[in-house]
Every structure is written in structure tokens, then in C-alpha cells.
Amino acid sequence: MSETTSASAVSRSGSLPGSLPGDLPRRERLARIVRVDHAGEYGAKRIYEGQIAVMGKGRHGRTLRHMAEQELVHLEYFEKQLNRRRVRPTLLQPLWHVTGFLLGAGTAILGERAAMACTVAVEEVIEEHYEAQLKHLGPEEQELTDSIRKFQAEEVEHRDIGLQNEAERAAGYPILSAAIKAGTRAVIWVAERV
Ligand SMILES: [Fe+2]
Ligand SMILES: [Fe+2]
């Protein structure tokens, strides 16, 4: 728990004992990157778990489990990053635990196409989000950069799976998609800060 205390102390006081004034913004920036990515991958895992709870025995079961397994790898990577960099996870993790699952299960209850529409919307936003992050990562963060690039490619694969499975033919697709995208962007905004 000392990591938690020191991480929040950094953001509140704006300085860290023994650190140079110049390296704090970068440190804080990286903390935000790792925190929000961890939150996002956690949410993704919960979305797929929600979908699997409803559709796991159906014809998309295998595909959903494949995507969920990849999300688990992403999540475990950012969990290690949090520990290594002594960054606390988002305080709202319990909320994402519930809302992620409900979003997955809820769209799956609406139907297979709605579930796929959810995947397409979320993964499109995550793909953009990773792209924006990559622009801020310098050569000194090569390993993190490579990992994000790899995950980004897998998110694109998930989006394409959704599109191949008639996401765009879901009832009310434009509204459903816009709502989920807006929600995902809001979650990203909050998770970077809280
Ligand atoms: Fe992911
Ligand atoms: Fe994904």
C-alpha cells in the first residue's frame, strides 16, 4: 500500500523527494498511460466475460473466449507495469468490474449482432486511444511501445471479428455504437485521472 500512498503524494504535491523537477511530468504521464491502459484492459476482460456468460455456449463461444484470452494477456501485462512503476490502479476499478460485465451481458442479451457491435465500438476507441499514446512514447520506452503496438493490432483483430459477424446489422447500430463509444471515451478520460 506504500506504492499507493507515494503515487498519490506525487500527483498532489507535484514533487517527489530526490527527483529532479523536470522529470515529474514524464513520470506522471507514464503513470497515467499505464493506469488507463490497465483500466481499459480490465474493462475489456469484463465485457467479454459478460458476453460469454450469455453467449458462451452459442456459435460465437469460441471466438469470444479467444478474444477474452488475449484481453487477459493485455491485462496481466499492465498489472505488471503498475507494480513495476509503483502506480496505483484506478480507484474506480470496482465500478468497471460491474459496468464492464453489464455492458457485455446487456449487449449479448440484445442479440449476437449487438454484442459484436459493442466489440466494434469499444475496440475502435481503444485502437485510437493506443495510437494517441504511441505518439507520446519516446525511444526510452521501447518495450512499452512494442507491447502497446502488439495489443493495438489485437484490438483491431477484435474489431474486424465484430464486423465480420454482422455488427453493423445490429438493430439501432448507429445509436448503439455512438453510445458505447461515448461511454468508452468517458471511461478513458476518468481512468486517466482517478
Ligand atoms: Fe485489450
Ligand atoms: Fe480487445
Image (spheres, grey):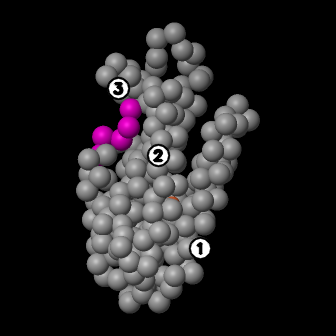
In the rendered view, does 37 fall on the left or right side of 89? right
Cα distance, mark 2 to mark 1?
21 Å
Mark 2 closeness class: few <14, some 14–19, many ≥20 residues within 10 Å = many
Crowd around label 3: few <14 · some 14–19 · many ≥20 (10 Å): few
Instruction: Give, as a three-letter code, the residue at label 1.
Output: Asp
Disc 1 or disc 3, which is closer to the eye? 1
Q: Could you tell me residue 107's position as x and y percent?
A: 33, 75
Give how far across and how far down residue 10 sits, in percent.
42, 24
Q: Quadrant of the N terminus?
A: top left
Q: Pointer 2: what residue?
A: 75
Residues under labels 2 and 3: Cα distance?
19 Å
Are circles 2 and 3 on residues that touch, CB within 8 Å? no
Q: At which x and y percent is residue 186?
A: 39, 59
Amino acid tagged 3: Thr
Q: Quadrant of residue 2?
A: top left
> Which label's residue is closer to the chain start, 1 or 3?
3
Segment tinted magenta in the rendering:
88-92
- Comes first in the chain, label 2 or label 1: 2
Q: Dot 1 lies on which element?
A: helix
Q: Which residue is mark 3?
A: 4
Q: For marks 1 and 3, give the CA distance.
A: 38 Å
Q: Position of residue 170 (x, y in %)?
A: 42, 87
The reply to whether the residue tagged 1 has its Cβ within 8 angstroms of ligand 2 is no
Disc marking residue 160? 1
At x 51%, y 26%, the residue is 84
Q: Amino acid at mark 2?
A: Leu
Can see residue 16? yes
Magenta stretch secondary structure, dominant: loop
Residue drawn at point x = 29 percent, y = 52 percent: 97
